[in-house]
Image (cartoon, rainbow, N blue to C red):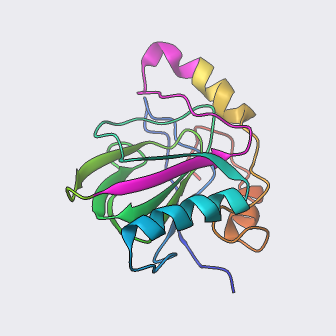
Amino acid sequence: MPHQPETLRFADAGGIPNSPLPLLLYRAVLEVPDAADRGAAFVALFARNGWTGAWRDGIYPFQHFHSSAHEVLGIARGRARVQLGGPPGPIVTVHAGDVIVIPAGVGHKNEGASPDLVVIGAYPAGQHADLRRGRAEERNEVLRRIAAVPLPLLDPVDGRDGVLLRAWRTADAPTGTVS
């Protein structure tokens, strides 16, 4: 049975454009006791579902978003408080085993983490993330880029059976509006 993520939607936050696509927050996807095994398990899970280019790090401590790719973050170790959707978006706490699927354009920022935080990130095959911080002079360009990012073929957690495909294909509001 597919996981049932929390869905969060964000209005345009000015410098952070956000997206009509909902952010998906999956809780306790991997309950692997060893953090090293959990990191490897996230890399394998994401790759099996077509999310590639895996990296291992943390979450930047400043507001940012990606205009050229959707992003998945698997919390392999530790915990973090992450602001989503740019200011004044909610701050959620994520723990080892959780997954956040962030549509292109949606802001995120590490608001504090345990010293042992390890995040595994990846992108749909063929997508490569840029790093945007919401500069006013880039707004028109990033809105065009976000609108051109294709939907992934598979949910990074549950593949073809996942919620992402249904949730993202039915999101029909144009970029930059409240959805």
Specify the quadrant of the image occupied by residue 119. bottom left
Residue span colored magenta: 117-140
Can you see residue 93? yes
Quadrant (top left/top right/bottom left/bottom right) for the N terminus: bottom right
Task: Name the residue furthest top.
Answer: 137
Taking the spot 52% from the left edge, 17% from the top edge, the residue there is 138
Taking the spot 58% from the left edge, 44% from the top edge, the residue there is 19
Give the side of residue 135 with respect to residue 178, left or right: left
Q: Relative to 110, say whether 158 is above or below.
A: below
Can you see residue 71? no
Task: Name the residue furthest bottom.
Answer: 1
Q: Is-magenta flag for residue 120? A: yes
Q: Position of residue 18 (x, y in %)?
A: 52, 42
Q: Is-magenta flag for residue 39? A: no
Q: Position of residue 53 (x, y in %)?
A: 61, 43
Counting every numbered tag in the picture gives 0
Taking the spot 55% from the left edge, 73% from the top edge, the residue there is 5
Q: Relative to 127, say whether 85 is above or below.
A: below
Taking the spot 45% from the left edge, 80% from the top edge, the residue there is 31
> Considering depth in this image, is 46 or 92 the residue closer to the camera?
46
> Considering depth in this image, is 148 or 126 the residue closer to the camera?
126
Q: Relative to 158, say whether 62 is above or below.
A: above
Q: Position of residue 28 (x, y in %)?
A: 46, 78
Specify the quadrant of the image occupied by residue 144. top right
